[in-house]
Amino acid sequence: MTKQDYIAVFDSGVGGISVLRHLRRWMPGERYVYFGDSANAPYGSRPTEEVRDLTLAAAEKLITEYPVKALVLACNTATAAAVKELREIYPERIIIGIEPALKVAADHFPGGRVGVMATEVTLREEKFDSLLHRFDENCSVAKIPAPGLVELIEQGRAGAPETEELLRRILTPYVGKLDALVLGCTHYPFAGGAISRVLGSGVTLLDGGEGTARETRRRLEAADLLENGEGEVVITNSRDDPEMVRLSYQLLNG
Ligand code: DGL
């Protein structure tokens, strides 16, 4: 592996672009190849085995088609279902997963009231339960599934009135009851404006994107694989529709 090899970034769709934004901020000189599996999104309501198979197939595709030094699973759902297996299959590669930013929430709001909004798979997997048990003594945690939200963001409608309506239905029971909301799905930061309008600006929104970017940088530095070149981004998508790639660039640069 060389410094010039790619950092591959994977998500079930366009959500991981929220992580790619942080990665580029922390490591502008790197070459990135992004793959969004929008043809199979959403992953979050599928059986775990299906999410695992889709994630392993996506990783294999990326690693076969590009020289890859690190793989960032920019998807909480794929991480919950498959990061362990990926590390076993590719022990020589740097594999970084993302998980809901509960530690950040517990550190900043000791004794606080924290919501975690994430997909069904993320909220039901064992990985989340062990994360929860590490921090639920420090704060009270409400699990908040958000069915339908990923679909709207995949359609480029994060800022549309129907997205805010859906968020109102999901989040109204929590208005006035939270100090922080963890966005435990990488699609959700794109709806951050609407979420804050519903919950009020006093509720802090937290996501794992920046922590993931910092961890990726730390791991590359430790392996002496950090590149300081021109920087490059290649975006690919499993949906045979140029609109998905256009939307991805728009979210990246927006
Ligand atoms: N972006 C993915 C995550 O972080 C989930 C989207 C989906 O359900 O496909 O969990």
Image: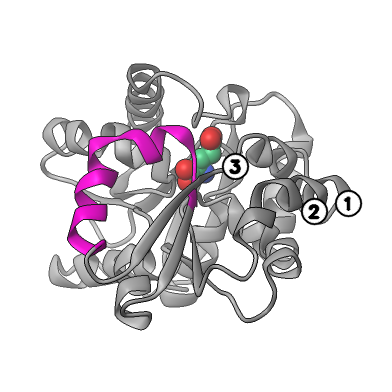
Quadrant in the picture for residue 159: bottom right
Quadrant in the picture for residue 58: top left
Distance from label 3 to label 2 (Cα)?
12 Å
Span highlighted in magenta in the image: 117-136
Helix, strand or loop under label 3: loop
Q: Is residue 157 above or below residue 53?
A: below
Report which residue position mark 1 lands on: 161
Q: Is residue 222 above or below residue 235?
A: below
Residue drawn at the location 19% of the way across and 46% of the way down: 93
Q: Which residue occupies the foreground of this view, 53 or 205?
A: 205
Q: Which residue occupies the foreground of this view, 57 or 143?
A: 143
Distance from label 1 to label 2 (Cα)?
5 Å
Q: Position of residue 8 (x, y in %)?
A: 40, 47
Report which residue position mark 2 lands on: 164
Residue 135 forms part of the magenta stretch: yes
N-terminal of the two: label 3 or label 1? 3
- Say which mark, if any, is on residue 146: 3
Helix, strand or loop under label 2: helix
**Which residue is at the far right?**
161
Q: Is residue 35 visible?
A: no
Amino acid carrying mark 1 in the image: Pro
Q: Residues within 10 Å of mark 3 (few under 14, many from 20)?
A: some
N-terminal of the two: label 3 or label 2? 3
Left or right, 210 with reference to 84: right
Distance from label 3 to label 1 (Cα)?
16 Å
Residue drawn at the location 37% of the way across and 72% of the way down: 105
Residue drawn at the location 70% of the way across and 74% of the way down: 200
Amino acid carrying mark 3 in the image: Ala
Dominant secondary structure, magenta:
helix
Q: Is residue 200 visible?
A: yes
Q: Which residue occupies the foreground of this view, 103 or 231?
A: 103
Q: How is the image coloured?
A: one colour
